[in-house]
Image (cartoon, coloured by chain):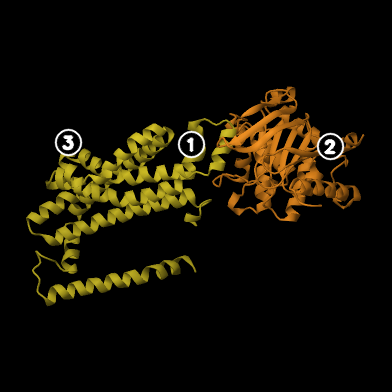
Chain colours: A orange, B yellow
């Protein structure tokens, strides 16, 4: 019921995205593909053959779902994300996709912008590398969504940290990904900017036909954005506890509600227990 | 500070030092009555410069062409070779140590061979200018390509970009600051290469370039002409360096701190 509620705020945005899809050549293919559901089955990963990073991890990320991985520093969260993105191969076990994940987008902790390209051309990079040449319209639209229309011609060196991350987010969204992997994307930003970007992500990604896996250190960010928060143990990463987050539409006011505070403190306790600290 | 004022602010101290040195030089030669064939006075050198302006200018022009062509060869060749060595790791391990030979073998020693291989006149001079200036370009290209941000490389891998596209859209632009450092060094070396090449393998007479002007003037103990030619050769080096700097500024000013 709550999920239906979260849909109500979205249709306009969804329409906007659909128009992007149908106006681009590649778009036709995009429509026929829907968000994959991703299954990690008994995934094991070691580094240098001895240090165990991920220990028989089983995780199910449903199609269109938003899962956040929380855990202590160095627990292997990022390794899990990179394996899902195909940047690393698991040693044992399997990562299954309900369909080929041809449209995967990453957003890293660093913005990773090309300093010699302005914002517009940085955002257009994935489309350009995919062999698309008339990407101006798609870029303009996504820049509008992240509030960077006026900064389109600026160089990265002239942007604030928050604007760089917005550019990075716009670049991840421009190819209309079906699987979005967020690796602690706003970890280096100040709290206010971070909250605002979280609200943007909620508005742009939640409820869209996109499966999202996010790694974060911030409990409140995880609760604010995800449908499900997975708490991992210190290395090697194992699932300690999973929390279903049914908080409805993700508006800024949500952070002030008792439900939000309760969920945050529950997860905090679980995380502390996972790290072996007495309650 | 405004433009004109700034130029003056930057240039008056070295100008003053140059004037002082010229004065001491003139004074020294006169005081110790050094014969002109050993060391001409600055005044005599200035006289030689304006004495036969046509001959010296055309000589400078000829050297400039050879130097410029040699420099372009080393710039293009160096970037291409440096890039190939990065794209093919085995080639890098096999060939890079050999490119050091270009740096270590004295140019004066191989210049006569260049004449044998490339023929008298401008071809061997271009070859000399290129050989002596290519190594810094290769080294700086390699260095630039190897220090490309791994995060950006990963980004291109995620987007499925091939080796050539990654080079063109990431490696090459990211290496430009480093490449321009190499080109600045190469600019100075190209003049040296051209003059040495001309010492060994150029025609004299009316179509003589600066290097031949120097050798023939030495035979006639016209040291004033030798100095005049040296000044012009140095001016060529400065001009090429200036052009490289200007190009670097044009390419990098929008994004790299070295050009601000």
Residue at mark 2: chain: A
Location of mark 2 (residue):
A10
CA gap, disc 1 and disc 2: 40 Å
Q: Residue A97 carries which label?
A: none
Residue B202 appears in view: no
**Above or below for A82 versus B109:** above
Tag 1 subunit = B
Q: Nearer the viewer, mark 3 or mark 1?
A: 1
Q: Are marks 2 and 3 in contact (CB under 8 Å)?
A: no
Q: In this view, does B174 lie to the left or right of A153?
A: left
The residue where tag 3 is placed is: B119
Label 2 vs label 3, nearer the camera: 2
Give me the disc on residue B168.
1
Residue most toward the bottom? Answer: B31
Does residue B177 appear to the left or right of B218 in the view shown?
right
How far apart in space, not on screen, are marks 3 and 1 (Cα)? 36 Å
Task: State whether residue A105 is above or below residue B214.
Answer: above
């Amino acid at each position: 019921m709550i999920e239906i509620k979260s849909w109500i705020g979205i249709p306009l945005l969804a329409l906007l995205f659909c128009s992007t899809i149908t106006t681009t050549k590649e778009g036709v293919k995009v429509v026929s593909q829907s968000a994959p559901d991703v299954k990690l089955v008994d995934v094991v990963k070691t580094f240098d053959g001895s240090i165990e990073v991920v220990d028989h991890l089983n995780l199910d990320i449903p199609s269109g779902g938003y899962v956040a991985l929380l855990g202590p520093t160095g627990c292997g969260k990022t390794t899990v994300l990179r394996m899902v993105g195909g940047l690393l191969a698991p040693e044992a076990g399997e990562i299954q996709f309900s369909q080929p994940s041809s449209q995967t987008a990453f957003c890293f902790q660093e913005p990773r912008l090309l300093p010699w390209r302005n914002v517009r051309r940085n955002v257009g990079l994935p489309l350009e590398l995919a062999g698309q040449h008339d990407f101006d319209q798609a870029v303009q639209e996504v820049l509008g969504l992240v509030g960077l229309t006026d900064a389109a011609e600026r160089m990265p060196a002239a942007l604030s940290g928050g604007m760089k991350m917005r550019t990075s987010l716009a670049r991840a969204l421009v190819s209309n990904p079906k699987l979005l992997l967020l690796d602690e994307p706003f970890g280096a930003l100040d709290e206010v900017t971070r909250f605002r970007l979280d609200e943007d992500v909620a508005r742009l990604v939640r409820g869209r036909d996109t499966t999202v896996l996010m790694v974060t250190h911030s409990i409140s960010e995880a609760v604010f954005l995800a449908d499900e928060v997975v708490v991992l143990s210190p290395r090697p990463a194992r699932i300690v506890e999973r929390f279903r987050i049914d908080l409805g539409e993700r508006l800024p006011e949500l952070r002030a509600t008792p439900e939000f505070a309760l969920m945050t403190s529950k997860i905090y306790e679980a995380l502390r227990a996972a790290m072996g600290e007495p309650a | 500070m405004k433009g004109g004022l700034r130029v003056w602010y930057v240039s008056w101290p070295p100008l003053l030092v140059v004037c002082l040195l010229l004065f001491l030089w003139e004074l020294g030669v006169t005081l110790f009555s050094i014969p002109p064939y050993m060391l001409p006075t600055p005044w005599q050198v200035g006289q030689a410069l304006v004495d036969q302006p046509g001959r010296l200018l055309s000589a400078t022009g000829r050297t400039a062409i050879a130097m410029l062509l040699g420099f372009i060869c080393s710039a293009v060749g160096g970037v291409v070779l440096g890039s190939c060595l990065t794209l093919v790791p085995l080639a890098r391990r096999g060939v890079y140590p050999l490119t050091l030979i270009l740096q270590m073998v004295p140019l004066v020693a191989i210049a006569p061979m260049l004449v044998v291989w490339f023929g008298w006149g401008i071809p061997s001079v271009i070859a000399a200018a290129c050989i002596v200036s290519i190594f810094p370009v290769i080294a700086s290209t390699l260095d630039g390509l190897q220090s490309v941000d791994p995060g950006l490389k990963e980004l291109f891998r995620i987007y499925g970009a091939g080796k050539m596209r990654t080079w063109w859209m990431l490696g090459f632009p990211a290496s430009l600051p480093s490449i321009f450092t190499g080109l600045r060094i190469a600019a100075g070396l190209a003049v040296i290469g051209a003059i040495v090449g001309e010492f060994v393998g150029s025609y004299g007479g009316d179509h003589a370039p600066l290097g031949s002007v120097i050798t023939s003037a030495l035979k006639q103990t016209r040291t004033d002409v030798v100095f005049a030619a040296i000044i012009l050769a140095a001016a060529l080096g400065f001009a090429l360096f200036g052009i490289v700097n200007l190009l670097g500024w044009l390419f990098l000013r929008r994004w790299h701190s070295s050009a601000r």
